[in-house]
Structures are given as C-alpha cells and as structure tokens.
Image: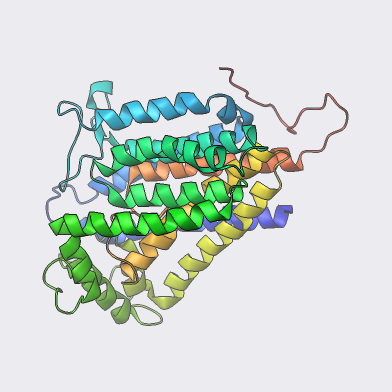
Amino acid sequence: MGEKSLKIFVFSIVALLVLGVVMLLSTSVFIADRVDIYHDVQRQFIWLGLGIIVCAVTSSIDYHFWDRSRWVWFYVALFLLILCFIPSIAQPANGSSRWIGLSNFGFDFARLQPSELAKIAVVFVLAGWCSKHKNQISEVRFGFIYPVLIVLIPVLLIGFETDMGTAALLICASLIILLVGGGNIRFFVGSGLCSLVVLGLAVWMNSNRLQRFIAFLDLEAHKTGLGLQQWRAQLALGEGGITGLGLGEGREKLMYMPYAHTDFIFPMIGEELGAVATLSVVFAFVMLLIFGASIANSAPDRFGKILGFGLVTLISLQAIINIGVTTGLMPNKGLPLPFVSYGGSNLLFNLAAIGILLNIYRQGHAPVKDPDADLFNGPRVTPRI
C-alpha cells in the first residue's frame, strides 16, 4: 500500500467526519425536547476533539502493546459492561441499559457506552489468540470452541442490556476474524446455521422483536407503528432523488423521523443531498474497507495483520448493517453509522481504531537501516504492562 492509497484512506474518514458534523447541524436542531438547539452539536464536537486526540495517541503507540495488554482491556470492558446493570451508575434509555454516567468523574455532559470498548477489546483478544495458537488454530478446540466461549461472555452481557444489534455485530465480526485467522471453514458454516436458529428462537420468544420483524416484512402495513422509522426513511430517500432537496431543506426531520440525527442519519443525507451523496458515503466506506484491509496486510507480523483486519471488519460491518437497516433491506437494529451518526462513544473508539491502523501502516512501511533501527521515522511511545 503506497502513500497515495493511505491518503485516500484518510481522506475517506475525514470526509465522513465532516459530513457527519454538517448533517448533525442540519438535523439535531429540530429535536423537540431540547431547549438548547445546539446541545448535541456541542457534545459531538467535544467527543470529536477527544477522538482526534485518542487517534493521535494510538497512532503513536506500538501496536504490539495491544497484544501484551489484551486481557487487561478485555477485563476492563467486562467490568464496565457489568456497571450498566447497577442502577446508581447506569443511565437507561429507550428500554435499554447500554450506558454508564460519567458525572461521578466530573463529566456531567457525557455518558459512556462500554460495548464500544468491548468490541475493540474482543478484537485484541482474538488477534492475540490467533497469533499465539497459529499452529493449532485449525483444531476445533483452539480454532473455535475456546475463542467462541471467550467472546460469548461480553456478547451475553451486551445482549442482556438489551443491545441485540451490537451483540449480533460482535458475533459476526468475531467469526470472520477467526476464519481469516486460519480457522476451519466447516466450523463456521455449522455455527452460522446454529446462529440463525438461535436468532430465530430469540425473535420468536420475544413479542417485541417478533412484532418488529413482522413490521419489517410489511412496512406499508405498519407505517404508523413499529415500521415507522424504516417507512419514513424510504420516503426520505425517495424525496431526495438524485440531487436532494438542499442542505437544511429536509422535511422528514421535522418531528416525523425518530432519531434522525443518530441511527437514521443516512436517509437524511439522501433527502437533503440526494443519491449522489448517499452513493458517495457508500463509496467512502468501500475505500475504507479496501485500503484498511491493505494496511492490515502490510503489517510485519501475524498479530498486526489480524488486528488490522479485525478493526476494519468491525467498522465496515457496522456501516453495512446501518445502511441495510435504513434502506429497508434488514430488520431494524439500533446501530449508528460510523463517523457520521451522533454518538460520542462510537466516534471515540472508531477513531482509536483508525489510530491503531495508522500505526500498523507506519510499522509496515518503516525503512529499516540496521538491525537496531527504530520502526518509526519519529519518536515511538511504547507503554509497558
């Protein structure tokens, strides 16, 4: 991967971030329960600033640090996920308990979603596992049973929150990472079929999920109920046409579309900026996937390759699911569009992942002048555990 490809990769991310800020300014000011119409915009700018700082830090840290400290991050993520069930700390919303308040730490303006850290921590663990057990990864125990049991711990905690979208995302990403890491494909075909059965049972046994799935199958008949969001999203995309109604001129955000600035910001882009903009967003994520995978492949060792690919898989899968949901191709799941939707935790940890990818690129392309040569052209920060 050359320097020009890296520039395209970074430009795609910057373009998505800029678009996210612009669309947040356009949509969030119409939220009915906000006295300060720029409340969410101000918060997002704070998270964006923190995310850029974290991205700069992770890009300067030798990515092998994440291998040495992978279990530390995993246990920290589990601890934070458990805090979501403690009433005095958790901040439930919309029937889910996915967030913990940061007011006890002096940050009254913010709350943290631990599942975002858990996703990256799982990638650390799986990358380290596939690297450590590379000679045994094709065996059923080391290539499937043990790592899947490890992943199930955060997945179950996230599922009980209830955040089925993130849980499903984490399962899919984990299976892909294990497969790329050398796992036997027969294990994953079987697990995929079993997962579909389990998913079907989970939907059938929960009346809310069952009704949401039925609404997805016939949005027209449920356009005033559980199919409202996806129905209005399709209207927004249709109203925008090729060139859109104009920035700020969208109608669906005027109290018609719930969560227009978060999970359903993609249709708002289509309504105001048209199919040209939505296709550009898709193209940006395709570039992120292609060149991100190329960065991962340039890593000088097995851990770096799997780590980089895992992080790219997480971001890309989330984008695919969000776009699929908001265009009516998939059942409704509450996942934001990476780098674009409003949401501080998601933005922060996605930028942290991008910083790690940039460090992998630097190490994969650093000139080595002698055996003791530094891996960077500049200073390197290598925390010790």
Q: Which coloring applies here?
A: rainbow
Where is the C terminus found, in terms of image quarters?
Answer: top right
Q: Position of residue 184 (x, y in %)?
A: 59, 50
Q: Position of residue 278 (x, y in %)?
A: 42, 71
In the image, what residue occupies the spot 18% across and 47% down? Answer: 36
Say whether residue 49 is visible: no
- Nearer the observer, 230 or 203: 203
Tell me how many marks there are. 0
Q: Is residue 49 above or below residue 16?
A: above
Q: Is residue 70 above or below residue 323?
A: above
Q: Quadrant of residue 331?
A: bottom left
Say whether residue 36 is visible: yes
Residue 139 horizontal side relative to residue 319, left or right: right
In the image, what residue occupies the spot 52% across and 63% down? Answer: 284
Q: Position of residue 186 (x, y in %)?
A: 54, 55
Q: Quadrant of residue 102?
A: top left
- Nearer the observer, 339 or 157: 157
Residue 266 horizontal side relative to residue 89, left or right: right
In the image, what residue occupies the spot 58% across and 24% down? Answer: 68
Residue reaching furthest right?
370
Q: Is residue 210 above or below residue 327?
A: above
- Nearer the observer, 313 or 204: 204
Q: Position of residue 52 (x, y in %)?
A: 48, 40
In the image, what residue occupies the spot 20% across and 51% down? Answer: 37
- Nearer the observer, 174 or 361: 174
